[in-house]
Image (cartoon, rainbow, N blue to C red):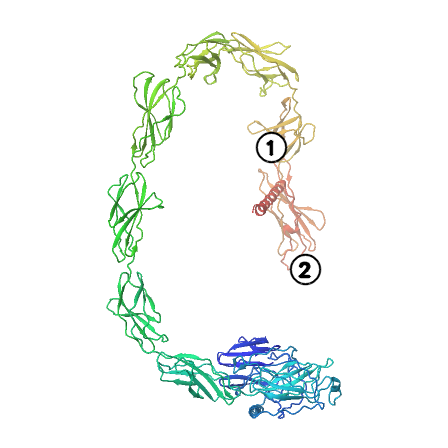
Amino acid sequence: SVFDVCFSPQVILVQVNPGEAFTIRREDGQFQCITGPAQVPMMSPNGSVPPIYVPPGYVSQIIEENGVRRVLVLPQQPEFHPGGHSPLHHPPPPPHAHLPAFIPHPAMLPPPPHLYTGMAGGVGDMSSQYIPQYHPAHIYSEQVSADSHSPHGRPPPFVHRDERASKTYERLQKKLKERQGGERGGGGGQMKDSPPPSPQKSRSTPPSMDSIYNGVVGGGKGLEAELGQGQTSTTAKQMEKEPGGKEGQWPEGWLFKLKERTRGWVRGWVRGWDRNRGWVRGWDQGLGQEQGLGQGGEQLSVTLEDLRPATDYHVRLVQLLFRCLRGSPSEAVAFTTRSCEPDPPCPPRKASGSKSSTLVLQWKAPCDNGSKIQNYTLQWDEGKGTGGYEQCYYGPQKQYRVTKLSPASRYSFRLAAKNDMGISEFSETVDLYTSCSVPSPPLPPELVKAGVTWLCLTWQRPSTSPKEDDIFYSLEMDEDEGYGFQPSYDGDELSCTVKNLHRSTKYKFRVAAYNTEGKSNPSQVAEFTTCPDRPGGPCRPVIRGRVLPNSFRLAWEPPKDNGGAEVTKYVVEISEGLSGVSWELAYSGPAMEHVCEGLKPGHSYQTRVYCMSEGGQSPLSETLQVQTPAVPPGQCQPPRVVGKPKAREVQLRWGPPCVGGGSPVSVYSVEVCGAGPQGSTGQEEVREVYQGSEVDCTVGSLLPGRTYSFRLRAANKAGYGPLSEHCEVTMGPGAPEPCKAPHITCKSPTVAVVSWEAPACNGGVISEYRVEWGAAQGTMQVCFSGASLTHEVKGLLPATNYFCRVQAVNVAGVGLFSEAVLCQTPPSVPAAVSSVHEEEDGPRTPPLYSPSTCLAVGWEPPCDHGAEISSYLIDLGERQSISVGPVTKYIIQHLQPDTSYRIRIQALNNLGSGPFSHTFKLKTKPLPPQPPRLECTAFSHQTLRLKWGDGPAKATPSDALQYQLQTEDKRGRFVSLYRGPCHTHKVQRLNECTSYMFRIQAFNEAGQGPFSTVYTFTTPRSPPAPIKAPRVERVEDMSSVCEVSWEPLLPMKGDPIIYTVQSMMGNSEYKQVYKGSATSYQMPGLQPNSEYRFRVCAIRQCQDAPELSGPYSPTVTLSPQRSELSAGSVSSVGPRAGADPARPLTDEQWAALIIMLCAVISILIAFIIQYFVIK
């Protein structure tokens, strides 16, 4: 790869050409690869060169000249050919794939016989040798082709260089030989003859880049180079026939003729180049890298542009493409560009040490372009500014002091550099200024704006100071505290705001100007005063005196802080209501109190005060709330009549008073004054007929046809207001007066005659009378309506109380009823019996009542019509009637079973017989069943199973015939044990050896049959309880004896308990080995190899009965004694191991187990519902 590298103390610029890569190591130790074309700037804080990888077979060296460092990549042992010819070398080996070096992609050429330089770095230490003035070169490529070449295949000799180029070339060769000699003495680490590998170059033509001089990127002039055509040419066929030539390879020799060498370009041509397309390779002496110059074509020359002055270049043809073949590279041809005058330098700059009459200038050396800079020319315009320049310095130094100058003046300078090749162009013109003298005292500061705690001041620049002079200012302030003037500002601004001052305070200020030459005298003193602050808020106002309904006196105190200025006026604002939304100005002036007038009674007001001074308006004081007292309301309008006045009442309505008095009206009062009948002049007493908060009322208790006068007044919490004007109202006609009590005469028990007198009509003719009749006062109904004064009432009940009243009606309305009169009709015969029914709950004790032969008849007693019923007559149809006393129930006996009868009943009293009732049909029931025979089918000491009748043990509830089983208790009473259709019943929880008495009864729809005779059944004695499994152990020291022991049982009701032990050897039958009252037994004569089984049974010895044996205990096995066991060990199996299978669970145990399972399942279901459904 070819890189243009520039090093400065801080920045390193790396130029990467197209198709190439640049690899560096970062601070974190990782590698970063940058592909071209690119320019990579790198920072070097300490000026050191970063590590750069070098190709195999090359070493890196550092050179420095004029403070600029460069890296040279050189071969370890390059071969030099003084004649400028280099032999053809074999192709270099490819680079190592595992090395992450900074290696270009195209294959590298063998090193030329001249200086090979480039930029790369290794991981190891870098050499510190230096070579002055190295110029990195650009790469050029262009498509070229040859039309002809020398017929002999030998190129003409090079044109000799001029003297200056030859000296430069010799100097570089010498330095390179010295460096190589030092490297050989030091023992390089690479192979001597191994050329640097070069990967294959891409065929694209890389663009040209700007020139770089001494590490500074600048725009150079366009450079030009071309290749001249040869005198002769040959075709491809002739080229193949030449001796030494091979197909696809270069001929033995080719000619590169240097026609002209200038500062930046070279012109030449190639002899013996085939017309077929090929490539030209250029070698830069400064970088030691090869680049393609262009693709071959029909032409035999190429122009190289943008070359650097005083730089060695090597050019050779790399490839020859003929019939898709690629040839070997040709020999390299070297040339060196000429030196020239230096580049234009940078403008000089002003250095430290300059004064008002002296300027110290410094500059940097530009690029010398191959020839050392000998002198510098510095020109100036002498401060005239006319554009003419005179030389003020000529010499090799890089700084110059210009003296005897005017202060605060401008001078223009420009600079040029000179070497052996000539003088460079002048730099850009720079204007520099000399310092000024001590400035004159400025004018006193002026006030721009004043605040409460700050003052904004400004001042002017001294008129005698030039504009170019840098003037600074010092502002001083005196606070009259005895410390004098103190600095408050120092800077180059012409204004300043002094803060943190006291309000309404006078301050003194002065300003002084100074520059680098010194400080001027202070200006005259100027006095300025800060503004006063706004006063504090006044205290909350207070009330002076009593608050009147329309005014009150308000007073307040001055603020505690007046802000530094006297208060000029006070402002009072008032707001109606408690919302404080709208405020009105009530007073503005210097007084400390004010009377607020024109207020409304009973209203709330808010007042506040603020003051004003030169400093502004103070904050508002606290708000004072004032409530004006209320007054009685004003006069109301007269009430008005609503609708048409009635005879005895009138409805009035009114509105509120126009003046409320500041308080809502709470009560209205209505007064009435009666004027007597129409046309009369008498006056009645005035009375109040209404008092309340409503705006209407109904006045009653008035007389019809009278004229009344009404007046109204309103009241609030302050009292009553005045009465309104009179309202005259004439009442209309009224309803008649109430009639007197009517007179009633009874013609018969069912007819009565009512008569009455006419009442007062109250101004209206009575049009009709209304008579109400009823058995009770609350249930009376109109029985007559007409103009007659009598009425006959029919259809009455005998011996019954009735009420009667009369009412009169006219055009004005309906009068009030008269008093109710009580009337009683005379007695009569009884009424008919309304209902007859069969008594369900009749007597149940035979022989008085039997549902089969008797009927229990009941009826409701009829009305006796004022005379007590003495008897009843029961009619049975064909049979003789039965007369009974004054009862409502009767049992008719001696009837046929299951027979229907028609019955009717008649009531009788002392006045006669009443009518018969309706006929009722009643039927006797069949005969009840006889009791069955009771038997005991099963018994135990606690239960008795009883059976009766013929039928299944279990029957359905729908059976017509049912039974009732009773037993005698301790008190001798029979209690029911069972009632139902079944034919068996088990009596439980009985005592042993006890007699129980039972009886049974059958019943059906016909009734309950008689009880059977009493049966006596006795429970047997209880056998002993089962014994737990016994414990069997061998007796110590006696292997043929074992001991069987068991738990004893308690005596049962005084009967002793004995025990019997049975044993079985092997599979034989059980034999009794012991019977007695002891709880243990030792059995001798055991055979050593036999297995024995034992069980125990308890026996109850009854006094007057045979013995009762209980169940046997679980079997216990005694295993045979084994020889491997110890002598004292006993082989026995516990009760669980040798016991018989467990006894089955009882009914109670099964029930408890089922209940527990149901409870667990219910809990699980509830948990599942709670967790999955509810949540």
| Type of amino acid at the residue the image marks with label 2 | Ser
- Identify the element where label 1 is drawn: loop
Q: Are marks 2 and 1 in contact (CB under 8 Å)?
A: no
- Expressed as whole percent of the image width and height from the top left, the position of residue 739 reads 41, 13
Front residue of 595 and 469: 469
Q: SS at mark 2?
A: loop
Q: Quadrant of the N terminus?
A: bottom right
Q: Judge whether 730 appears above or below 267 on screen.
A: above
- 409 relative to 786, above or below: below
Q: Nearer the viewer, mark 2 or mark 1?
A: 1
Q: Quadrant of residue 158?
A: bottom right
**Above/below status of 149 relative to 899:** below
The mark tally for this picture is 2
Closer to us: 550 or 1048 = 550
Residue in front for this viewpoint, 690 or 783: 690
- Seen at 37% across and 85% down, the residue is 403
Q: Can residue 125 be seen from the camera position used here?
A: no
Task: Tell me the crowding category of disc 1: few under 14, some 14 to 19, or many 20 or more residues within 10 angstroms, Cα based.
Answer: few
Kindly identify which residue carries mark 2. 1123
Q: Quick check: can you spot residue 325?
A: yes
Q: Position of residue 1095 (x, y in %)?
A: 65, 47
Residue 464 versus residue 907: which sits nearer the camera?
464
Q: Is residue 216 left or right of residue 667?
A: right
Pick whichever of labels 2 and 1 is earlier in the sequence.
1
**Circle on res. 855:** none
User: Which residue occupies 34% across, 69% down?
Assistant: 494
**CA separation in Å, label 2 and label 1:** 59 Å
Spot occupied by residue 853 in the image (x, y as percentages of width and height) = 63, 16
- Residue 1100 lies in quadrant: top right
* Residue type beneath disc 1: Thr
* Residue designated by label 1: 994
